[in-house]
Image (cartoon, rainbow, N blue to C red):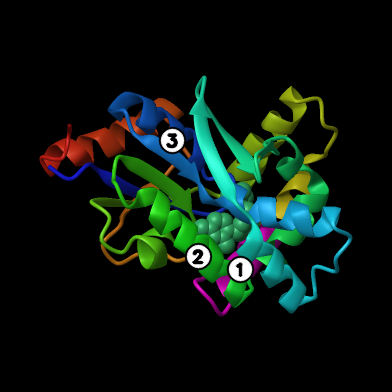
């Protein structure tokens, strides 16, 4: 039997990553954080001192980059050419530029090719913005997660506070709204629910309830391994 392939899409801080990781643990799948891949390209562009507006140079970086992910102790670690960049890809500087970098056609083509290769043998849960619509249109289950911008800002603020990173609710909310706008309005592979995806509004759900919803859907479809 072919191993399970699950696609999870949704806006920033909608609960995708946590859900993907818990689901992966419950079902013995490998979680792939595709946002981290676009962040890794952005990090390299900034480290090399390149202008993120220079589409040709940025695309060249993306094509050359060897990105790998590992699932360890419940977290997804991201490696670029063998170096662990899991922390560096979360800085405000990378977050500021990643929507622009991920809007370039050549960058997306390079990342989508790597993502499909990671999913080729099955046993994976990929999370991002275009997984159900573009990367894996034949996934066994597609989930689209959403939540109000205010609730997502509260969650992101809590995460930042836990890491000791100073920020205000207004700043975090403004950043989430800016990325929603850019990610949903770009010409290529915008954030959009796939027609055959199930939609989960997580505004009033706990993480446990989100995961349960998905497990229930898998059982209903006879896909529970
Ligand atoms: O999930 P995240 O916040 O780490 O994603 C970072 C950015 O990458 C996000 O603003 C849009 C982009 N992205 C994308 O274009 N396609 C994906 N499949 C995943 C992320």
Q: Quadrant of ligand 1?
A: bottom right
Using the numbered discs, state the Cα–Cα distance from disc 2 to disc 1 in whole angstroms: 16 Å
Q: Quadrant of the C terminus?
A: top left
Please tell me which residue is depicted at 60% across the width and 65% down the height of the picture. 183
- Identify residue for label 2: 191
Question: Mark 2 falls on what kind of element?
Answer: loop
- Identify residue for label 1: 107
Q: Residue 95 location in percent, x, y? A: 74, 52
> Relative to 52, does residue 118 appear above or below in the rendering?
above
Please tell me which residue is depicted at 38% across the width and 66% down the height of the picture. 133
Which mark lies nearer to you, 2 or 1?
1
Badge 1 crowding class, 10 Å Cα cut-off, few under 14, some 14 to 19, many 20 or more, is many
Mark 3 close to ligand 1, CB under 8 Å:
no
Please tell me which residue is depicted at 66% across the width and 43% down the height of the picture. 153
Contact, CB < 8 Å: mark 2 with mark 3?
A: no
The reply to whether residue 77 is visible in this rendering is: yes
- Identify residue for label 3: 19
Using the numbered discs, state the Cα–Cα distance from disc 2 to disc 3 in whole angstroms: 18 Å
Magenta span: predominant SS is helix
> Relative to 191, does residue 16 appear above or below in the rendering?
above
Mark 1 close to ligand 1, CB under 8 Å:
no
Contact, CB < 8 Å: mark 2 with mark 1?
A: no
Badge 2 crowding class, 10 Å Cα cut-off, few under 14, some 14 to 19, many 20 or more, is many
Does residue 202 appear to the left or right of 150 in the view shown?
Answer: left
Badge 3 crowding class, 10 Å Cα cut-off, few under 14, some 14 to 19, many 20 or more, is many
Q: Nearer the viewer, residue 135 or 185?
A: 135
Q: Which residues are magenta?
A: 177-190
N-terminal label among 2 and 1: 1
The label shown at residue 128 is none
Does residue 54 appear to the left or right of 32 in the view shown?
Answer: right
Q: Residue 65 location in percent, x, y? A: 64, 56
């Amino acid at each position: 039997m072919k191993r399970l392939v699950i696609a999870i899409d949704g806006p920033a801080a909608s609960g995708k990553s946590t859900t993907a990781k818990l689901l992966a643990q419950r079902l013995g799948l490998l979680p792939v954080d595709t946002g981290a891949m676009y962040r890794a390209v952005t990090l390299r562009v900034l480290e090399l001192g390149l202008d993120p507006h220079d589409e040709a140079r940025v695309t060249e970086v993306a094509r050359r980059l060897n990105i790998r992910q590992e699932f360890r102790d419940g977290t997804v670690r991201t490696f670029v050419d063998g170096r662990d960049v899991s922390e560096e890809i979360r800085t405000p500087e990378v977050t500021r530029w990643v929507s622009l970098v991920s809007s370039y056609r050549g960058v997306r083509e390079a990342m989508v090719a790597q993502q499909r290769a990671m999913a080729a043998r099955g046993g994976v849960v990929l999370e991002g913005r275009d997984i159900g619509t573009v990367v894996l249109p034949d996934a066994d289950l597609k989930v689209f997660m959403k939540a109000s911008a205010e609730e997502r800002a509260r969650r992101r603020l809590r995460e930042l506070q836990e890491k000791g990173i100073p920020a205000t609710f207004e700043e975090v909310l403004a950043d989430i709204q800016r990325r929603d706008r850019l990610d949903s309005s770009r010409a290529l592979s915008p954030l959009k629910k796939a027609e055959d995806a199930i939609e989960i509004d997580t505004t009033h759900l706990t993480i446990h309830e989100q995961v349960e919803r998905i497990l229930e859907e898998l059982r209903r479809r006879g896909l529970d391994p």
